[in-house]
Image (cartoon, rainbow, N blue to C red):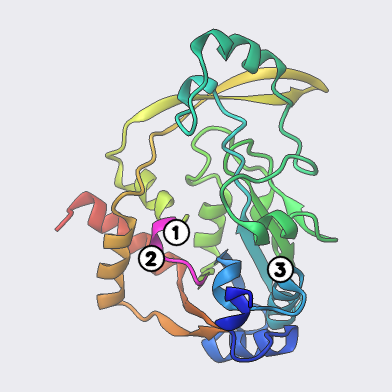
């Protein structure tokens, strides 16, 4: 028998997932940044489709769902390590790499749910070639428009707007290791080095390789920061399906992480 089925006491459904989300504290009208591990929920009738629909049912059209839809493979091949490519290829790869297009550029490394979510009807995706977000609901345009190319997870990013709107972060079977909002704290802490990035973009309809400044992100201590955060702040916990899940204030998490990064214990 499939191991996922063996770990699931009964079929997960859209309606049951909605009820689980409600019990965790997800309410109509809420703005949530979702990180998810689909396999952690157990066997779902409808898979990622049912989970996304359950999230929409829970926040309703008055709320807003955001997910990271990163596409880090549209980057300078000189930076690639998993796997690296020969340096003799670099110029060719830069000149022939397809330009970032929100509607067709696939995600990389964020899982099945965001990759499907970005294709849903009435979902919008922001303009950053590396660290875009997709959103659905009442405030998607307010949050996703004018995503700054430079410092893509900083103040002029969707994260900065989510902070201002007092959004919540929802982990579904994930941990602080992938907690994107902590990157906003890296900018605010002011002690990360800067690097020059590059990506293929459409500029007036013509593909160009464009370079821009950003931080050299470091998420190696995110789990440690998250553990410390939970000792001092309210983090709601419950199971969504079989997935251990958390719901907490994005603003409180960023503020705490900023302080920790400035004065690590």
Q: Nearer the viewer, mark 1 or mark 3?
A: 3
Specify the quadrant that holds the C terminus: bottom left
Q: Which residue: 57% across, 43% down?
A: 131
Q: Nearer the viewer, residue 84 or 239?
A: 84
C-alpha separation, residue under disc 3 versus residue under disc 2 = 27 Å
Residue 173 is one of the magenta-drawn residues: yes
Q: Is residue 236 above or below residue 107?
A: below
Question: Callout 3: few (<14), some (14-19), or many (20+) C-alpha neighbours within 10 Å?
Answer: many
Residue 235 is one of the magenta-drawn residues: no
Start and end of the magenta stretch?
172-178
Nearest to N terminus: mark 3 or mark 2: 3
Q: Read off the residue under disc 2.
A: 253
Q: Is residue 141 above or below residue 201?
A: below
C-beta proximity under 8 Å, tags 2 and 1: yes
35 displayed left or right of 246: right
Q: Nearer the viewer, residue 203 or 242?
A: 242
Q: Read off the residue under disc 1.
A: 179
Q: Is residue 40 above or below residue 257?
A: below
Instruction: Identify the element where label 2 is drawn.
Output: helix
Q: Read off the residue under disc 3.
A: 48
Q: Which residue: 43% across, 50% down?
A: 184
Residue 159 location (% of width, % of height)? 53, 54
Q: Nearer the viewer, mark 2 or mark 1?
A: 1
C-alpha separation, residue under disc 1 versus residue under disc 3 = 20 Å
């Amino acid at each position: 028998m499939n191991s996922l089925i063996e770990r699931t006491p009964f079929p997960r459904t859209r309606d049951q997932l909605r009820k689980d989300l409600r019990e965790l504290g997800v309410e109509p009208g809420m703005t949530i940044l979702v990180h998810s591990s689909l396999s952690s929920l157990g066997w779902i009738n409808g898979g990622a489709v049912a989970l996304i629909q359950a999230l929409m049912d829970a926040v309703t059209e008055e709320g807003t769902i955001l997910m990271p839809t990163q596409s880090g493979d549209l980057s300078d091949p000189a930076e690639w390590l998993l796997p690296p490519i020969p340096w003799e290829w670099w110029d060719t790869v830069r000149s022939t790499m397809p330009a970032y297009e929100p509607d067709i550029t696939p995600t990389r490394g964020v899982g099945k749910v965001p990759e499907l979510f970005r294709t849903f009807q009435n979902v919008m995706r922001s303009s950053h070639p590396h660290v875009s977000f997709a959103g659905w609901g009442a405030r998607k345009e307010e949050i996703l428009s004018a995503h700054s190319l430079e410092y893509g997870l900083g103040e002029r990013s969707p994260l900065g707007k989510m902070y201002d709107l007092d959004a919540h972060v929802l982990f579904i079977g994930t941990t602080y290791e992938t907690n994107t909002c902590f990157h906003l704290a890296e900018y605010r802490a002011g002690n990360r080095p800067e690097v020059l990035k590059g990506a293929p973009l459409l500029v007036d309809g013509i593909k160009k390789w464009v370079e821009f400044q950003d931080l050299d992100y470091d998420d190696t201590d995110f789990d440690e920061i998250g553990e410390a955060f939970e000792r001092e702040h309210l983090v709601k916990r419950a199971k969504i399906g079989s997935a251990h899940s958390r719901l907490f204030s994005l603003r409180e998490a960023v503020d705490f992480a900023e302080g920790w990064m400035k004065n690590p214990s």
